[in-house]
Amino acid sequence: MSLLRNNKILTTVLLLGLVCALLLCGIRFGHELKNSKVMLFMSISDLELLSADSGMDLEYYVNQFEGAGIVVADEIPLHGAVGLIEDDKQYSHNPIEGFNSAAYEGNMVRVFHLIPKYAARYAVLGYDGPQEIENIFYRAATDRNIRVLWMTPFTHSETDELISDPRPYVQVAENLSQRIARHGLSLGSGFSAFERYVPSPVLIIGVFWGTCAACAFLCLSVFRRFNSLFMVPALALCVIAFAAAPELSVSGFSLLAALAFPCIGIWYAAEKLEITGKDIGAKPIKNYITAFFCIFGVSIMGGLFVGALQSSSMYLLAVYNFRGVKLSQILPLVFAVYIIFRRLYGGNGIRGVFNELLGGGKFLMALFALALLGASVLFIFRTGDGMLSVGVLEQKFRNWLERVLIVRPRTKEFLVAWPCMAIAFALVSLGGKRYAWPFAILTTVGLSSIVNTFCHSRAPLWLSFTRSVLGALIGLAIGLVILILLRGFGKRHPDYEKSAG
């Protein structure tokens, strides 16, 4: 807080950026709120395939499907809108020959096509029916702004047998209609399409300026110095960059915000850890809660900056996407290693760092380092497009969370980051700071994850915010329990009073 008070110019620019970000997010939320109609479609040719396999009349299938709210036609009735069929990676859309989606001025809608690998998710994960296919449709509609769901015939995951019984299809439609209603979406014969929307250049540049101020505060936090005069050319450069290359500058400043805000948060957490380790009378629970809400707020602010910059209809339709997901995860982690070691162990320089670490036992520290490296690699490879698949138990747990909660919080936040932060505060308060660094560093996972949630611009803004809040509340509760237990049963290191003094 002292940094904000002592640097009024930077604080003013940061607040200006925040106001612009909130205005852009408000406009984006209004567009997303109107985008509430979902169509579930199946072609006549696919119904004929089911009819031929079962021997039942085609008219019977048509009546059953239409009665469940499934639109049946020769082709998808787009009513003049352009349908952007989502690609196999669920990232953008399949190219349309001779069509430039970025330059098109008319209405467009995202379409999810149940390709064979998804249609074969019948009776998987221990389910006996189409539950996972229903989950796939549910996530497409709620998480990725898709408003046309193209259903195709299901096949059994083990036997490849065609599922020609109409009841599973009807079951999916009826269950899906009830589930998406919690998100304010309705399943019917029509769909919502996004109109072309380009955010105000003035508001975008305002967010650029706020991002520059955040970077300046990061420099002040780490190096204790920053010449405010540098802001003048920086702010002018923002205007020039946007005028010369609007989309490239939006991508660049989105990445900059995704890096700066988590780093500010981890710096603040490291400072609180240092205070807790030096002050015998410090209250670790109070410090943990204070640090938690501050770094959560900073991360949400970063998320709103990214969400505001990516508020055009091109981002909501996934024509444009955030670039640099892996980089936005790796660099804050590298910064966390630097700042945690510096704040906790750097009082006597590099030699002091090594003395502290080796004092904890070479084998134990090597084990911690290996665990941290493994967890970090696993986290990075599971981020973004995902090079590693989700296990059966974890996927079932995710599905359960989706049904119990309106939005599934990210497990890396409430099961990793916030509990690790609590363990770090507990260890530091007990004089075991040489054991705290792996847990403190893993806290970065949560900060980066929150901002990364908003980087998925095809997800509704309110959903990203709710996901982050739920993860924070659950993680805070778990962290407090861990902190109280460790404080209650842990023993203070005998040299703590001496080292703290």
Image: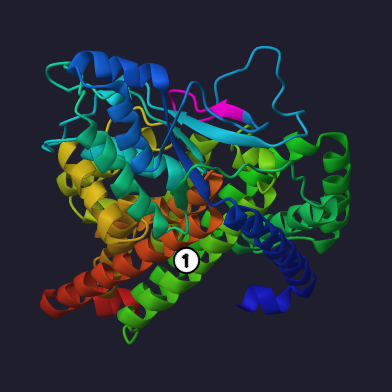
Q: Quadrant of the image for the C terminus?
A: bottom left
Taking the spot 23% from the left edge, 28% from the top edge, the residue there is 121
Q: Is residue 418 left or right of residue 310?
A: left
Front in this rendered view, residue 58 or 116: 58
Taking the spot 42% from the left edge, 49% from the top edge, the residue there is 337
From where the camera sits, is residue 434 visible?
Answer: no
Q: Quadrant of the image for the N terminus?
A: bottom right
Residue holding disc 1:
296
Secondary structure mostly seen in magenta is loop
Q: Is residue 226 left or right of residue 398?
A: right
- The quadrant where residue 384 appears: top left
Secondary structure at numbered mark 1: helix
Front in this rendered view, residue 438 or 84: 84
Q: Is residue 499 left or right of residue 360?
A: right
Q: Amino acid at mark 1?
A: Phe
x, y (%) of residue 86?
Answer: 50, 28
Front in this rendered view, residue 125 or 8: 125
Q: Is residue 330 left or right of residue 114?
A: right
- The quadrant where residue 11 appears: bottom right
x, y (%) of residue 378?
Answer: 30, 36
Q: Which residues are magenta?
A: 83-92
- The quadrant where residue 129 appears: top left
Q: Is residue 336 above or below residue 64?
A: below
Front in this rendered view, residue 461 or 471: 461
Q: How is the image coloured?
A: rainbow
x, y (%) of residue 190?
Answer: 54, 43
Taking the spot 81% from the left edge, 63% from the top edge, the residue there is 228
Q: Is residue 98 above or below residue 103?
A: above
x, y (%) of residue 125?
Answer: 15, 36
